[in-house]
Amino acid sequence: MADNFAQTVKQQADIVKIVGDYVKLRKTGAQNYTGLCPFHKEKTGSFSVNAAHNYFYCFGCHEKGDVFTFVMKLENVSFPEAVRAVATKCGIPLPKREFNSPEEARDAGIRRQLIDLHEAATQYFEAQLKSPEAARAREYLTGRGVTPETIAKFRIGYAPDDFNHMRETMRKHFAEDALRASGLFSAKEQEDGSQGTMYARFRKRITFPIANEQGKTIAFTARALEDVDDKGRPIAKYMNSPETPLYTKGQVLFNLDKAKAPIRELDFALLVEGQMDCISVYMAGVKNVLATSGTAFTEMQIRLLSRFTKRVVVNFDPDAAGSNAAEKSIAMLTEEEFDVRVVTLEGGLDPDRYVREHGVQEYMAALRGAKRHSEYLIDRARLQFPARTADAKVKAMNFLLPHIRRMPNRIQRDEFAADAAQKLGIDSALLRQELKQAAAARLESVPQFRQEPISENEKILLRALVLSEDDPARQLAADQLSMHPEWFAELPMADILESLSQAPAPENPLDAAPTNESRAQLAVALQHSTGDKEAPLLEQVRDALEALDTRRMQRRQRELRSQIAEADRRGDSAMLDQFMMEKMAIDKALRER
């Protein structure tokens, strides 16, 4: 976004009004206002806003900056996004964006349409829930204790049992290519490779919108009302939107848009599995709750959550699938140095049912009694291998050892090991020896810091990201990487790419690297190649971004092969169709590259 426009917005913006949307301010001088700091917990207001000089400062945690810095930090958005947000709040028209190619303009146009299309779909499903056909859906929701207030708050809807009605409704307002890219419709591939007539993906299902951090609908989860179809074949209970230009499942946490402020305020997040668990707990008054949508955490979700807190309480379903998901999530969170605690509800109930049957006060008492993750895992080991025989003790120890090794802090590792040895009846010296041998073997095979080679694509993008804000190559790289973090999530320099794409480079670009080793890598990456016929950097950036997208699609292609095989093995025709359609779309996109 051009510097002159940002300057115009900054001059016209009333920082007191903008900050006042987030923080309750009181006037303490001619131009000064104070309130409780939104960036750290405090009981007396040390947060100050100066209207004359257009800045904020906290005397407690020392956060400071202008109106853009405030929005960037509080909303976790990039500088261009903060400028747009402030301009919108002030009623300042956004400048017409210039694109580097027709293709880039087309992709940006489709993304904008998809946001509008998902909003229209949300309204469509909401209206359908009030129709006569949806009587059974309303009955189901009432039976689950879902109130009209909850339906309105979470915008729950109903997808009618009709292949064509939604398509014809949306066609009046949206282009064909946007409809096909939305994931709201399916179509069979023709013999010539083209896509046939679209039909509604979600039918005879209750719909739950999935929103991004800003509260915009980007996808849906839909629950079936039947267990089998007309031919007696089993129907998948839940169906999700496929990945689209707006939505990547492993990068979204359900309810983050509503929960992020309470999470920051309370400094911990409550993690549950399903949307209904999340909705029920939220409406009961526990506002800092997120759902993983029935899957274990991904690295991108952990990185997203770490922007708001490093403390998590996990309350997954007590069945085998829930316990396994809890173990995997605990492992990943522990490696990222989260403080993890686990709740197991009495009677084997899930959070939704527990709140309905026992009330929110008992549920909150259960949260306060959450076990440390080490205690939970030791209990799991004793439950799985209850015999006091030597063989059972070995199995229990082998179950716990990987979890102990994952803990980055040595003191916590030692405490975990000592507690496990005492409760399992194992010689603590033996357990420490096992840990020492495992650590030695790990050091031999995996160095503490593995200086992975940086690809040429990474070097190109890093060189672009340290340029000035108004450089076209920098704008293209920052915009695309901000929209598609999945493109670079597994690269050696992922953290630095993310940091530089979200905010302007520091005065010394090497300050963006957190360690001496990564600083050395970045220094090498920023050295320009000396080729005589080097293409312009903007062209190199386009090629690098396309290469990363291709790599992402190839990775997803491999994942889909195993998912298709598993769905076929389970006889899950709905999921099989969904995976096949997604794979065909990726195959086609790769062929056209």
Image: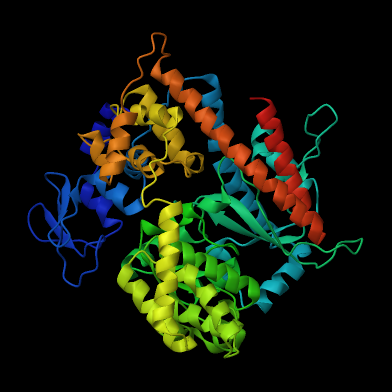
Depth order, front residue of 283/352: 352
Decide if residue 329 is on the left or right side of residue 35.
Answer: right
Depth order, front residue of 228/177: 228
Q: Residue furthest bottom?
A: 388
Depth order, front residue of 264/157: 264
Colour scheme in use: rainbow
Residue 234 location (% of width, % of height): 83, 64
Residue 292 visible in the shown view: yes
Residue 526 location (% of width, % of height): 31, 28
Q: Residue furthest top?
A: 532
Would you place residue 199 above or below residue 254 in this image?
Answer: above
Q: Quadrant of the N terminus?
A: top left
Residue 312 location (% of width, % of height): 41, 69
Q: Quadrant of the C terminus?
A: top right
Would you place residue 508 above or below residue 436 in this image?
Answer: above
Residue 372 visible in the shown view: no
Question: In the image, what residue occupies the spot 48% across and 84% down?
Answer: 363
Question: In the image, what residue occupies the spot 40% across and 56% down?
Answer: 443
Question: In the image, what residue occupies the spot 20% across and 34% down?
Answer: 507
Q: Residue furthest right?
A: 231
Would you place residue 24 above or below residue 139 in this image?
Answer: above
Decide if residue 180 is on the left or right side of residue 463.
Answer: right
Decide if residue 113 is on the left or right side of residue 481.
Answer: right
Q: Residue furthest left?
A: 29
Question: In the image, what residue occupies the spot 26% across and 27% down?
Answer: 4
Residue 308 position by quadrant? bottom left
Residue 154 location (% of width, % of height): 55, 63
